[in-house]
Amino acid sequence: VAGKPVVEYNPAQNPARINFSICHEIAHTLFADYGEVIRNRATGEARREEQQLESLCDIAAAEMLLPPGPFSEDAKNAEGNLNSLLQMAKRYEASLEAVMLRYTDVTTNDASITVCVLQENVLVVEYSQTSQGRAPLLETGTEIKTGTAPYECFAPGWTERGEYELKGKKYAIECIGLRPSRRTKLPRVGILFQPYEEATSTLANDIEYVLGDATAPRG
């Protein structure tokens, strides 16, 4: 408007979603062509490039919402499981997705997060981030094995635990349904990976709360 960017958002959404959405849109202004190109209209390779851009803007939103200093201190005291990350999301009034990204940035624990989207009944990796600057566990576009715990979490807020093997190594995973992209409306799932031996110590004394809909039991 009048040569200046304007962010539009849905005030009916919860505060964490609003905060993340505004920061995400601000991140788009970091790219020189933000006012010239209409996003989410492409197909094929151009569409994949747009998805990468959206992921970059998600990462930038996490940077804005969760200052490294204070968050690092909280991360040190966190148990490192999904429940502790949910508590941090409430404390910072930030989305769980943003907290998961920041957590892998600052923790010294061996942890990885992966965000997937459901495409033609298969979960496909949107992006993955691993702690201590190591290579992602899963590359963008990788298909998640069917029949595993993430396939129980298509509805936002639904959770499940399970095991997953990658390259001969066993991981404990905690999964949660994330809100769909505003544009695609496709179900999305966040997965927290931890080496099985380390994860069992953080989960051993944790009551296993599996969130879902009692009127639509799974299994």
Image: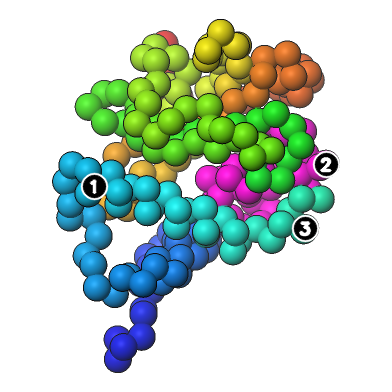
Residue located 74% across and 32% down the image: 109
Left/right placement of residue 160 relative to residue 206 reads left
Residue located 71% across and 46% down the image: 106
Residue located 40% across and 21% down the image: 144
Q: Is residue 90 magenta?
A: yes
Q: Position of residue 123 (x, y in %)?
A: 35, 26
Left/right placement of residue 51 relative to residue 178 reads left
Residue holding disc 3:
70
Secondary structure, mark 2, is: helix
The mark that comes first in sequence, 3 or 2, is 3
Question: CA–CA distance between discs 3 and 2?
Answer: 11 Å
Q: Is residue 101 magenta?
A: yes
Residue holding disc 2:
77
Residue placed furthest toward the bottom: 2
**What residue range appears in magenta?**
74-103
The mark that comes first in sequence, 1 or 2, is 1
Question: CA–CA distance between discs 1 and 2?
Answer: 40 Å
Q: Position of residue 19 (x, y in %)?
A: 52, 63
Please state which of the two labelled residues, at mark 3 or mark 1, is closer to the viewer.
Answer: 1
Q: Are marks 3 and 1 in contact (CB under 8 Å)?
A: no
The three-letter amino acid code for the residue at tag 2 is Asn
Secondary structure, mark 1, is: helix
The disc at residue 195 is none
The three-letter amino acid code for the residue at tag 3 is Pro
The mark that comes first in sequence, 3 or 1, is 1
Please state which of the two labelled residues, at mark 1 or mark 2, is closer to the viewer.
Answer: 1
Q: Are marks 1 and 2 in contact (CB under 8 Å)?
A: no
Q: Position of residue 215 (x, y in %)?
A: 40, 24
The three-letter amino acid code for the residue at tag 1 is Arg
Residue 1 visible in the shown view: yes
Residue holding disc 1:
47
